[in-house]
Image (tube, rainbow, N blue to C red):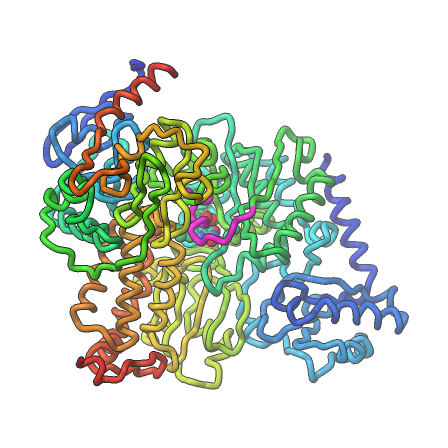
């Protein structure tokens, strides 16, 4: 395929898009879909038809617009007007006013900090394309990066570009992507694989799901570029079975890409061939760990094995395998479109680019955000997030899910990057961010995450299998006011044993929520143990008499 | 043995030793008289790395590594018996004991039990974690063997020997975390198993009294593990 031919494809779709003067997009990602956004979309289609505006107005579904707390969301002309909480009854007003001023009562101004403070790269197309339409993706210069890479760059050049971008893995570990690609590239083997880790299992996290539901083609494009760079011709997306909409859209996207020769044999008439298949997970958190994920794809029980050897050397069916997270892969195509320098210019010295977070908990604007690395927690919580629900007092923010920790108020002005978060005893994690106010009890939080680790431990190694059960038991005792200071010492000791001797990341990080709450909220532990009171009023204590007995 | 395997040197507990580069730390340590405690490892079976008793310190690597599954490399400096490792091993062993119902006084393997022996080796004086005392079944449906989940430490030796040596894969694991359990076939009573060949290997590789021969009384069930290296050698000759 010549460059002219390829450019023509994109142009054709752009022209088609421009035929309409108004693009009405209704969010159809999971959060808005549960608020019946499909019905709103149908109402728009009907209204446009009735007002005879079919020639000028195009109604389509789109991916996540971010402000999930205020769905269903609708945009007109990609940002010209954004409407929140749109019901079927509002549709007439919006269509009536489409050539005039936006409808004030539903409108969210474009300069709202929630939108103005974000920098969208991984989520670039979320909300401006119809996830079920390949044409939309092509109109936004989709598959252009893949074309450029395949026709202009050698494998080594592609990897160098990734190194230059400074992108680090977004699945939790933050391993440099360029370095990982180059190890898989250098590994010897006739057959190599690329795996997209879409087993998002952190409670409260929905970044990967939103990206898959909103822009599946960009992940496929990222995988194909990765496949070319490392020398793989087969890709797998390991996706949670609990994400039916994402699975459906991904399946459709793979079919569209194959039919149009963006996947398959000799892509763009080059020698490079690449196929992508889906593998569905069955809801085990531990299957997100790369070696367990590989075992699961191989049809075995999803349990981790010790590393080294790392999958880059010995992965799927013993072949060199590249595993990257959904968000990591969705950054690839934009990096090649905009240049590695552009990407590296965002963020901090060691943490480049942007990070997607799922804002949840006691915060006004829950939803999906993408912010430059180095932004402060205060900006995220109070500017973008709009502050604490009910204007209560901020207490802590939990990042990194069951592997992370709680960050107290004194660190609100700390920049968000891999090193800073690790420095205060938490981790970047995959992007879950739960904001807690004064009514949250830290022991309750630690207990919740320990319960999660206890039931999600695979049971292969003893420290994690028994240690998490023991720690959970101790936390229950503390929360019920039945524990002594000896139990507290035992808890601290167990944290060390489990952290240092567990086989995989799940066990090694399981004590983190306990450790970080002990570090910053020790007085709460003491209050529960010595005074038998829960300062936040969450835990139900046994009566004091009974404890004496 | 192909001659293409490189010979390297490394340090184990301040002792310089030579090794083939595809050997594990555990193998090399044993050859050189350095004893590293193990529970789930058994010569002749694929290592699992699950018991964590054999974790060692390797200079330059922040996390502890299982000696049974970590291959040696040139210049590696390994410590197998620091005070910290000794303490952690004792703690891990206590977790083993606290998990299920290890009442030695009424166990058929009393006196022959590797868990018991290990407690002496690592100088564990008592269990300072609370016992979890779960409710566990005893499967006595088989006419030759008994599976007592109360004594099981989930080392998976039985699962591996049944799959890798006997080739019948009767035994496996169900459930996750603290709920994990050894099962026979599709979680049916062992006596109903259609795949079990009655070979008894699982019983003899079991480190505790979880798998015993029917009719054994307290302190009677000794195990014959020495058969295994012989069997695996036969397998290697065949292939
Ligand atoms: C218990 C556990 C769960 C994990 N779950 C996920 C997950 O859901 N999604 C993910 O992308 N990575 C997960 N990881 C991290 C992966 O093992 C792996 O590091 C990651 O997919 C690499 O991709 P990246 O380099 O692009 O971040 C998990 C790790 C552990 C230890
Ligand atoms: S740390 Fe936990 S999840 Fe990981 S292998 Fe051990 S038991 Fe399984």
**Image: B127 above or below A144:** below
Across and down, in percent, residue B169 comes to 42, 33
What residue is drawn where x is 22% and y is 42%? B55
Asked if residue A159 lies in the magenta stretch, the reply is no
* In the displayed structure image, the side of residue A371 where residue A470 appears, left or right: left
A54 left or right of A406 in image: right
Question: Which is nearer the eye, A121 or A65?
Answer: A65
- Was residue A291 drawn as part of the magenta stretch in this picture? yes
Main secondary structure along the magenta-highlighted residues: helix
Camera sees residue A168: no
**Residue located 64% across and 73% down the image:** A71
Q: Residue at x 33, y 68 (%)?
A: A446
Foreground pick, B89 / A35: B89
Residue A159's spot in the image, x, y percent? 49, 39
Quadrant where the image shows the C terminus of chain B: top left
Q: Is residue A61 left or right of residue A512?
A: right
Q: How many marks?
A: 0
Pick whichever, B222 or A457, lies toward us: B222
The quadrant of the image that shows the N terminus of chain B is top left
In the depicted structure, whether residue A250 falls above or below residue A183 = below
Direction from residue A67 to residue A20 in the image, left or right: right
- Residue A482 sits above or below residue B39 on the image: below
Query: Where is residue B54 shown, x and y percent of the image?
Result: 21, 40
Q: Quadrant of residue B120?
A: top left
User: Magenta stretch?
Assistant: A280-295
Q: Position of residue A208 (x, y in %)?
A: 54, 56
Specify whether residue A312 is in view: yes
């Amino acid at each position: 395929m010549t460059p002219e031919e390829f450019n023509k494809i994109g142009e054709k779709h752009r022209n088609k898009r421009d035929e309409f003067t108004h693009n009405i997009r209704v969010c159809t990602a999971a959060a808005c879909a549960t608020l019946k956004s499909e019905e709103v979309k149908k109402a728009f289609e009907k209204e446009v038809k009735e007002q005879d505006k079919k020639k000028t107005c195009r109604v389509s579904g789109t991916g996540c617009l971010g402000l999930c707390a205020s769905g269903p969301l609708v945009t007109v002309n990609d940002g010209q007007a954004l409407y929140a909480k749109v019901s079927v009854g509002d549709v007439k007003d919006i269509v009536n006013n489409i050539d005039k001023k936006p409808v004030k009562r539903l409108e969210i101004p474009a300069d709202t900090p929630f939108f103005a403070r974000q920098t969208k790269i991984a989520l670039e197309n979320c909300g401006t394309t119809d996830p079920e339409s390949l044409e939309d993706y092509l109109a936004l210069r989709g598959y252009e990066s893949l074309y450029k890479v395949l026709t202009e760059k050698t494998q080594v050049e592609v990897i160098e570009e990734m190194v230059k971008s400074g992108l680090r893995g977004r699945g939790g570990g933050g391993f440099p992507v360029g370095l990982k690609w180059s190890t898989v590239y250098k590994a010897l083997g006739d057959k190599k694989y690329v795996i997209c880790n879409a087993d998002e299992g952190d409670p409260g996290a929905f970044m990967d799901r939103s990206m898959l539901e909103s822009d599946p083609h960009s992940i496929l494009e990222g995988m194909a570029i990765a496949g070319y760079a490392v020398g793989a011709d087969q890709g797998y997306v390991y996706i949670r079975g609990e994400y039916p909409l994402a699975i459906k859209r991904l399946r459709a996207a793979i079919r569209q890409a194959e039919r149009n020769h963006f996947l398959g044999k000799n892509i763009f008439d080059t020698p490079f061939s690449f196929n992508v298949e889906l593998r569905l997970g069955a809801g085990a958190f531990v299957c997100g760990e790369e070696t367990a994920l590989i075992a699961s794809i191989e049809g075995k029980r999803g349990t981790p094995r010790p590393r080294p050897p790392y999958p880059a050397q010995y992965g799927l069916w013993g072949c060199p395998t590249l595993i990257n997270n959904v968000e990591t892969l969705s950054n690839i195509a934009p990096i090649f479109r905009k240049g590695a320098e552009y990407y590296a210019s965002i963020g901090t010295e060691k943490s480049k680019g942007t990070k997607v977070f799922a804002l949840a908990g006691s915060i006004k604007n829950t939803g999906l955000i993408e912010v430059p690395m180095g932004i402060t927690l205060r900006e995220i919580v109070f500017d973008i997030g709009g502050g604490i629900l009910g204007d209560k007092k901020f207490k802590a923010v939990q990042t990194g899910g069951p592997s992370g920790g709680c960050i107290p108020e004194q660190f609100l002005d700390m920049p968000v990057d891999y090193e800073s978060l690790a420095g205060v005893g938490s981790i970047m994690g995959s992007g879950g961010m739960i904001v807690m106010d004064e009514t949250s009890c830290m022991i309750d939080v630690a207990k919740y995450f320990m319960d999660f680790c206890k039931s999600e431990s695979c049971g292969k190694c003893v420290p994690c299998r028994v240690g998490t059960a023991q720690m959970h038991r101790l936390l229950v005792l503390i929360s019920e006011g039945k524990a002594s200071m000896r139990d507290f010492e035992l808890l601290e000791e167990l944290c060390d044993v489990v952290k240092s001797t567990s086989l995989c990341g799940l066990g090694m990080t399981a004590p983190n929520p306990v450790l970080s709450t002990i570090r910053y909220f020790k007085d709460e532990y003491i209050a529960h143990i010595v005074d038998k009171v829960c300062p936040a009023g969450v835990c139900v204590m046994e009566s004091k008499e009974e404890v004496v007995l | 043995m192909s001659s293409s395997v490189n010979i390297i040197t490394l340090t184990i507990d301040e002792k310089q030793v030579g090794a083939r580069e595809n050997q594990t730390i555990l193998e090399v340590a044993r050859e050189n008289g350095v004893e590293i405690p193990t529970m789930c490892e058994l010569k002749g079976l694929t290592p699992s790395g699950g018991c964590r008793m054999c974790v060692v310190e390797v200079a330059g690597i922040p996390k502890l590594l299982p000696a049974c599954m970590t291959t040696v490399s040139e210049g590696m400096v390994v410590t197998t018996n620091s005070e910290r490792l000794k303490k952690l091993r004792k703690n891990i062993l206590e977790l083993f004991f606290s998990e299920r119902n290890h009442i030695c006084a009424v166990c058929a393997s009393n006196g022959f039990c590797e868990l018991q022996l290990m407690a002496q080796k690592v100088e564990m004086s008592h269990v300072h974690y609370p016992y979890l005392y779960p409710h566990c079944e005893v499967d006595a449906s088989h006419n030759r063997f008994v599976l007592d989940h109360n004594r099981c430490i989930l080392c998976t030796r039985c699962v591996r020997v049944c799959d890798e040596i006997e080739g019948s894969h009767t035994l496996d694991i169900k459930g996750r975390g603290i709920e994990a359990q050894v099962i026979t076939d599709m979680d049916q009573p062992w006596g109903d198993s259609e795949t079990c060949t009655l070979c008894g290997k699982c019983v003899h590789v079991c480190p505790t009294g979880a798998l015993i021969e029917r009719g054994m009384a307290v302190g009677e069930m000794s195990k014959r593990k020495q058969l295994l290296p012989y069997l695996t050698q036969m397998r290697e000759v065949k292939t």
